[in-house]
Each structure stands twice: as C-alpha cells, then as structure tokens.
Image: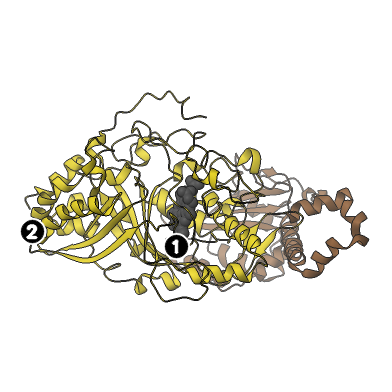
Chain colours: A yellow, B brown
C-alpha cells in the first residue's frame, strides 16, 4: 500500500465549508489561545456567532497570509441547547457527545487524580458552551485573529468568557516532557491533506468529516437536520497537566547513566526527543532523521520490528497507532487527527524538583466517531494492553497509572519489566465538542427559537 | 504445553453436542415451571452475587468447565443453559452431584419442568432430552483443558517472577551456565523471556 498508488475515485469534499480547525495541520512554530464561553441568552449567543462567522476560517491554507492565522468555534451539547437548538436535533447526536466527557470518565480512564470532581472549573460543569480557539505561526498574526474574535464576544452581553488558556510552541520545539510532537498525521482521501506515512493509504473522509463514507463503507451517524451535521466533526478537547519532575525522577531512579536514561524514555514514547522513531533508529537519537519530514514517519512495524525489540508494542506511539502490527482488531478504524499544543513554562533542563508550575498540553483529538476513535483508543489502547498481549498494562506516558501497574519492554535475553508505575499526566479538564461546518454555523446563528 | 489426550476420552457413551479439540459444548433448553420465573431469577442472582464476591470454589471443584451461562427467555417460559466442558459434560455428573455444584444444579433446575434431581439415576437422560446440539462450535484454544490453562497461568506467573529476580540475571551471566544457555530447549525459553 502506498499513498501514490491509491488511485481512489475521489470523493469531493466541500473543503471550504469545513472549519480549518479540523483538517488544517498546525503551523510550527505556533502560538494560540483557547477560550471557553458560556451563553446565558440564546439570542445573544446567536448574535455573537453571526459576528464571529467572518472570523472563522474554512478550508486549507490559502493565498492570503493574514489567514495563516485561523479561528475555530466548537459547540458542546450544552452549548447547542443554550443556543436554542430544538430538542429533536439535540437528541439526534450520538450518546458520548450528548453525555459529555465528564460522564464518560470511567470509560476513558479519568479516575483518581484525573477524576472530573477534581477538574479545573468550568470543566465538567454545564457552563462549557463554546470552545473558541485561534492558532497562528506568530504573535502578530495571532493578535489579528484574536481581535476579530474579541470584537464578536465583547459586543455581546449574554455571552461570557469563563476560561482561557494561552498556548505556544516552546523554543526547543519540544513538548514539556522533552519530546517533539505533531509528527504523525493520517492522510484523508479527497481532502488534499497528505498523510505523513507514505506506506499507509489515506483514510476515507468519513473517518473525520460527517456526510462522507467512512472506512466501514457507511456514512457516520448524522445529526439532524442535515445542514447542521454536514461537514462537521467532533473534538475531544483536554487539558493535560504533565508531571515533568516526576518523569525525570522516575527515569533517573530506574537507570544508571544518561544514555540508559535517554533510551528508557525513548522506549516509553517510541521516538527519541528529536522525533526519530525507534523502529528506524533503535540505539540512539538521530536528529537528522527526526527533522526530516520525508523520513521521520516512513515506517511500519510488522516486517522489521514485529516483536517490538526496537519500539516496544507498549510504547506510546505504537499503542495509539499500531500501524500494521499484530493486534486485536483493525487499526484503520481507530485513527484520530491530533492537535497537541503546549501550555505553561518549561521546567528548566536538569531540574528534578517540582516547582509547582502548571505545564502540559491542550490536546485536541478530532474524528467523526467519538466512540470508536478517541474513546476506543483511551479504553483499549492507552489504558489496557490486551490488544498487544499485555493484559492490564497501560501506556507508560499517557496511561492513568495508580502506582501498581507494570510495563513490559522486550529485550534479549530477558524483557525488562517496569513495576509500580506512577502517572506522569493528570487530566485537568475536558469536553466533547461538535465542530460544525461553516453553513451549519450560519444555520445555528440564524435559529429562530 | 502438549495436550493430554486423556481429556477427550470418556468412559461414558457418546453424547450429543459438538466438540472442538479437547472441549465440547453442552446447551439445554428447559421449560420453566409456570409462575417460577421470579424465584429462578432470585436463585441465579444469588449465584452471580457469590461469583462477584470471589467465590469460585465451585468452579475449582468442577475443573472442566470453561464457561457457562443461564438465560431466561421467551417471556419467562424457558431457561437456556449453555456451557463448554472439557471432555463430555456428563463424565463427572455423578461426582458433581455429591458436591456444592450438585446442590446448585438442583436449586436452578428444580424450577424447570420434569427435572428429576441431580442425584436421580435418570438425570443424564433428562438433560439429553432437553439438549439441542450446536451446529457450530469452535474454540480459540482447542488443545487446552481448563486444568492446563490454570497450570499454564501458574507457570507463567512463576516464570515472570524468576525473570524479575536479580539471581536469575546473575545466573545468565555466570559462565558455568553457558552450556545450559546455549541448549536449544533453553533458547526456546529465553525467546519467551525476551518479551
Ligand atoms: C497524555 C499525554 C501525552 C503525551 C505527552 C503525548 C506525546 C506524544 C508524542 C511525543 C508523540 C510522538 C509524535 C508524533 O508521532 O507525532 C505522540 C504521538 C501520538 N499520540 Fe500522544 N501524547 C499524549 C497523549 C495522547 C492521547 C491521550 C492520545 C489518544 C487518545 C494520543 C495519541 C497520539 C497519536 C495517535 C500519536 C501518533 C502516533 C503515530 O501515528 O505513530 N496521545 N504523542
């Protein structure tokens, strides 16, 4: 299977009606901002949407450099209700979205420290109505995009900003745990968005956008009326705190040299800090490989790394995208688009003590099927290991450990088994959102209920 | 672990029901006595609760049961008992009759029509009369009996504990063990130790 070889009868996507926040890869470097808004008055809410519409971008990159910054607006189920969407329509959305992320906590592993009862307000409450985000390659263009957004909500009395979060790429280009992110991205048939792995055929558009056939050959479940659902998708938005000091302490405690430390961390992630994948560079980091977009995602597992002696089956990237590895089920049905962005100050290099600062990522996981994509990945792939033959083991980085679990790292002569795993990440909040197409946004803004 | 051929042999006459490797399926449909469905439901709830609190002693006693289910259906008129046993379900029925398992069978099936009691000499014929053999029955581990699975689990747990011990690590590095390590049998074991 090669991306070029797939001579697919192209489905024509109404790409310009799809919000840029869905398909458009994020720039690097980037700066941005997330807002959560509460709508107290439906008419004011719609008026605000009408003012916001011109600031919301559709489609992929265009000629106008001003639009290298883009804003997106997503709506929660509570938000649809607050905007006055009729009951029939509200009920036509799939269950996970209707229930909201907090209600799904047990299933997706938000337990213990990550329990919604401990989330940062307003997450987990009925006040989260709209999630507006803006992303840009630099501060100046971000400011322009934000100005357009602010004008929309500041002029409206019945709408209030109740949470905001600045995000930006760290100067190192790495996330708070020290690894490069945003490398692997699926290809989407008919969209012009190329996958980063030339060995994998693009996925059907219906995996990511409502109104088009998905990998099963069916249309994704369609909320009603059609104009509301078409060209929309779902987002799982999460604020994930990273315990950087605990991560570094764990690595130090379980190794006896800087080389061993680097290798152990890489075995847990599946890539080296530069982004070079273990499957292509098993013994040491290779910055040239990590920085080369043509090579750094050009690999599968079965042929050269079946047993996981290079990249363990339990490593983060091999769990959340097993590619062609021998697993239970069909990996192609469980892909997501990710937009991971960093918040908070980095913990300076070499510091092992926690400084109390809040740092981590705002993760946005995008797909047309919350249940068989985001939720499946969390419950089957991140927080269990039966699919790879390690029943009960969890993702070493993204898993919600309680200090008791183990993680197996294949090696000769005998496998290494990490014991009593602590958690390195804590969910601070999150919500399921619907990201409507542009026509659907207009429909919402013109409701007359 | 090699399958022990004995598991498929039975001193009993051939019984209906499909087999796949060492295991066979046993499915019966019984008429519930009129008005007994709620009582039966209570009995089944109690059995289930006992499982929930970790009381698997009865299953240990049986030692040949892979899984079993009781389902009330058809407007509370019928009971389905579907199960998978090593060998044939009836080989040990006399033995079970004397244990807590027999008592449980009595409590469940006494709510169905015509059940003679698990200690009755005709109980097997009664079960066969209620049985509907499956048309398809397949197992993912046709070579393994329940006993072997338990054994394999114990061996693996012990093996993993050895791998975690520093003594084993040292033994691997000890030149005195070179010959053992190089032997094909041990290489096979090490292949399992690697991940
Ligand atoms: C909790 C903290 C997390 C951290 C620190 C983290 C970090 C990373 C890093 C460093 C990569 C490698 C870069 C790349 O391949 O693009 C990656 C890849 C990925 N992550 Fe995460 N991640 C986290 C959580 C999650 C969660 C919760 C999911 C899914 C529900 C997820 C899904 C993915 C996927 C799908 C990939 C791409 C894998 C591939 O295609 O090979 N991540 N992550």
- Circle 2 marks a residue in which chain? A
**Dot 2 corresponds to which residue?**
A44
Q: In this view, does A289 lie above or below A126?
A: above
Residue visible at 66% across and 68% down in the picture: B58
The image's mark for residue A62 is none
Q: Which comes before the other along the chain, label 2 or label 1? A: 2
> Disc 2 versus disc 1: distance between alpha carbons?
39 Å
Left or right placement of residue B38 versus residue A86 in this view: right
**Dot 1 corresponds to which residue?**
A176
Q: Position of residue A192 (x, y in %)?
A: 34, 32
Q: In which quarter of the image is residue B20?
A: top right
Q: Position of residue A167 (x, y in %)?
A: 32, 59
Q: In which quarter of the image is residue B153?
A: bottom right
Residue visible at 35% across and 26% down in the picture: A10
- Of tags 2 and 1, the one toward the viewer is 1
Q: Quadrant of residue B76?
A: bottom left
Disc 2 crowd rating (10 Å Cα; few below 14, some 14-19, many 20+) is some
Instruction: Label 2, secondary structure: give it.
Output: helix
- Circle 1 marks a residue in which chain? A
Report the number of numbered marks: 2
Left or right placement of residue A359 versus residue A46 in this view: right
Left or right placement of residue A93 versus residue B163 in this view: left
Residue visible at 59% across and 51% down in the picture: A285
Q: Does the residue labelled 1 lie within 8 Å of ligand 1?
A: yes
Q: Is mark 2 within 8 Å of ligand 1?
A: no
Instruction: Label 1, secondary structure: give it.
Output: loop
Residue visible at 40% across and 58% down in the picture: A170
């Amino acid at each position: 299977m090669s991306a070029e070889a797939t001579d697919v009868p192209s489905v024509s996507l109404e790409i310009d009606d799809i919000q840029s926040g869905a398909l458009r890869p994020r720039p690097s470097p980037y700066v941005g901002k997330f807002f959560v808004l509460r709508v107290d008055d439906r008419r004011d809410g719609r008026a605000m949407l009408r003012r916001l519409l011109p600031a919301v971008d559709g489609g992929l990159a265009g000629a106008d450099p001003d639009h290298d910054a883009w804003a997106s607006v997503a709506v929660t189920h509570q938000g649809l209700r607050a905007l006055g969407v009729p009951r029939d329509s509200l009920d036509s959305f799939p269950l996970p979205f209707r229930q909201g992320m907090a209600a799904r906590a047990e299933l997706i592993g938000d337990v213990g420290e990550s329990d919604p009862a401990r989330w940062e307000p307003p997450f987990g409450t009925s006040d989260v109505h709209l999630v507006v985000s803006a992303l840009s390659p630099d501060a100046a263009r971000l400011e322009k995009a934000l100005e357009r957004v602010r004008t929309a909500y500041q002029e409206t009395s019945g709408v209030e900003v109740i949470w905001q979060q600045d995000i930006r790429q760290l100067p190192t280009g790495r996330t708070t745990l020290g690894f490069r992110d945003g490398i692997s991205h699926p290809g989407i048939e008919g969209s012009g968005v190329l996958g980063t792995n030339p060995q994998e055929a693009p996925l059907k558009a219906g995996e990511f956008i409502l109104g088009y056939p998905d990998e099963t050959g069916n249309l994704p479940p369609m909320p009603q009326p059609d104009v509301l659902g078409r060209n929309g998708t779902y987002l799982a938005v999460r604020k994930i705190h990273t315990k950087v000091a605990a991560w570094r302490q764990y690595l130090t405690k379980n190794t006896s040299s800087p080389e061993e430390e680097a290798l152990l961390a890489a075995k847990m992630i599946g890539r080296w800090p530069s982004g070079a994948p273990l499957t292509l560079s098993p013994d040491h980091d290779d910055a040239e490989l990590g920085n080369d977009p043509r090579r750094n995602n050009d690999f599968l597992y079965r042929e050269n790394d079946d047993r996981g002696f290079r990249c363990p089956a339990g490593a983060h990237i091999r769990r959340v995208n097993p590619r062609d590895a021998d697993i239970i089920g069909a990996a192609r049905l469980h892909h997501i688009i990710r937009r991971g962005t960093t918040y908070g100050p980095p913990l300076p290099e070499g510091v092992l003590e926690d400084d109390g600062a809040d740092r981590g990522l705002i993760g946005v996981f995008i797909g047309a099927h919350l249940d068989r994509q985001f939720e499946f990945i969390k419950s089957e792939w991140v927080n269990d290991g039966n699919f790879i033959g390690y029943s009960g083991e969890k993702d070493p980085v993204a898993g919600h450990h309680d200090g008791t679990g183990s993680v197996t790292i294949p090696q000769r002569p005998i496998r290494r088994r990490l014991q009593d795993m602590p958690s390195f990440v804590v969910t601070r909040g999150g919500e399921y959102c619907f990201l409507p197409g542009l026509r659907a946004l207009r429909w919402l803004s013109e409701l007359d209920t | 672990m090699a399958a022990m051929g004995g598991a498929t042999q039975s001193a009993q006459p051939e019984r209906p029901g499909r087999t796949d490797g060492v295991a066979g399926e046993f499915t019966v449909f019984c008429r519930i006595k009129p008005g007994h469905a709620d009582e039966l439901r209570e009995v089944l709830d109690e059995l289930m609760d006992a499982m929930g609190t970790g009381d698997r002693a009865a299953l240990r006693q049986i030692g040949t049961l892979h899984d079993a289910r009781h389902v009330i259906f058809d407007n509370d008129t019928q009971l389905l008992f579907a199960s998978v046993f090593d060998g044939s379900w009836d080989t040990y029925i006399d033995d079970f009759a004397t244990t807590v398992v027999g008592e449980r069978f009595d409590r469940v099936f006494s709510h169905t029509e015509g059940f003679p009691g698990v200690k009755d000499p005709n109980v097997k014929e009664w079960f066969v009369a209620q049985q509907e053999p499956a048309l398809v029955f397949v197992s993912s581990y046709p070579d393994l009996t329940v006993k072997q699975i338990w054994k394999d689990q114990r061996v693996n747990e012990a093996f993993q504990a050895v791998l975690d011990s520093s003594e084993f690590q040292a033994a691997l590095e000890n030149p005195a063990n070179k010959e053992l390590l190089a032997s094909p049998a041990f290489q096979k074991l090490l292949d399992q130790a690697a991940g």
